[in-house]
């Protein structure tokens, strides 16, 4: 596990060893710590704009003793067949785990909204900067629905229960955008999450209906299979 203070110190240490500026987006339990939703996390989820940025980040964390590990006990096997699966790194002292994505989280794109509507930006070091952009809480909920790991649903419940001004329309609009741009999983992932979430918190029904209607349209427009003779 890693605390918020431990995360900040780790980012400063990484920033001090970079040979170039690196920008990434925080969207997991590490992002929740920036909001104050939780005090510690075991996974530091980062999304990079390109492979060059991730490669430089990995070079530095390897110098700090992190080694690549298998994601198969963490993520659904079907999703790990995707090109945009994460590279995972751990250290023997178990001081947090890095899950590092590039451009997509499986099929979910780094959208223009993700890049523009960030909650906060943090810079570490003065020469070659590590810039960590914390995604909006609505994006956190979508991406935690997509990653669907142990404790992700509990994190979603925490966000919704603590935020009285959660923007449901923003979430729905982003899901539709992702679907239109080729993410064939995000509708189902978020719809399943909302069905379960309704057992614990109030989810405005009109947004559930919007999502359900989009799923029905998708099924209706799907090409029909020819019957076998």
Image (spheres, rainbow, N blue to C red):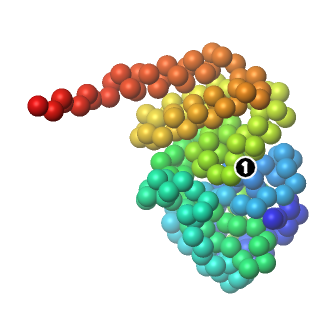
Looking at the image, residue 138 sits to the left or right of residue 228; the answer is right
- Residue 104 drawn at (x, y percent): 51, 52
- Residue 91 drawn at (x, y percent): 72, 77
**Is residue 169 placed above or below 228 in the rendered structure?**
above
- Depth check: give the residue in front, 229 or 27: 229
Q: Name the residue beneath numbered marker 1.
A: 151
**Residue at the (60%, 49%) spot, across then down:** 147
Image quadrant assignment for residue 101 = bottom right
**Residue at the (85%, 50%) spot, across then down:** 38
Residue occupying the far top of the picture: 206
- Residue 60 drawn at (x, y percent): 66, 78
**Is residue 177 placed above or below 204 in the rendered structure?**
below
- Residue 125 can be seen, yes or no: no
- Depth check: give the residue in front, 11 or 179: 179
- Depth check: give the residue in front, 176 or 41: 41
**Residue at the (75%, 43%) spot, across then down:** 154
**Is residue 40 placed above or below 175 in the rendered structure?**
below
Image quadrant assignment for residue 68 = bottom right
- Residue 77 can be seen, yes or no: yes
Residue occupying the far left of the picture: 229
Mark 1 neighbour class, 10 Å CA radius: few under 14, some 14 to 19, many 20 or more = few
**Residue at the (85%, 67%) spot, across then down:** 6
**Is residue 15 placed above or below 177 in the rendered structure?**
below
């Amino acid at each position: 596990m890693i605390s918020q203070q431990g995360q900040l110190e780790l980012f400063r240490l990484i920033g001090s060893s970079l040979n170039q500026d690196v920008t990434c987006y925080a969207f997991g339990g590490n992002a929740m710590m920036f909001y104050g939703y939780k005090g510690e996390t075991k996974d530091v989820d980062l999304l990079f704009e390109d492979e060059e940025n991730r490669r430089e980040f990995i070079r530095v964390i390897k110098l700090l003793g992190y080694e690549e590990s298998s994601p198969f006990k963490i993520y659904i096997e079907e999703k790990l067949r995707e090109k945009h699966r994460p590279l995972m790194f751990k250290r023997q002292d178990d001081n947090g785990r890095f899950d590092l994505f590039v451009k997509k989280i499986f099929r979910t794109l780094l959208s223009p909204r993700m890049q523009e509507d960030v909650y906060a930006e943090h810079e570490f070091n003065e020469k070659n900067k590590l810039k960590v952009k914390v995604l909006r809480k609505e994006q956190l909920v979508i991406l935690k629905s997509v990653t669907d790991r142990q404790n992700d649903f509990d994190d979603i419940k925490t966000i919704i229960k603590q935020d009285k001004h959660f923007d449901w329309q923003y979430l729905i609009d982003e899901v539709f955008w992702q679907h239109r741009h080729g993410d064939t999983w995000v509708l189902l992932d978020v719809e399943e999450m909302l069905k379960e979430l309704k057992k614990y918190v109030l989810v405005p029904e009109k947004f559930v209906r919007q999502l359900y209607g989009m799923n029905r349209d998708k099924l209706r427009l799907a090409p029909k299979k020819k019957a076998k003779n």
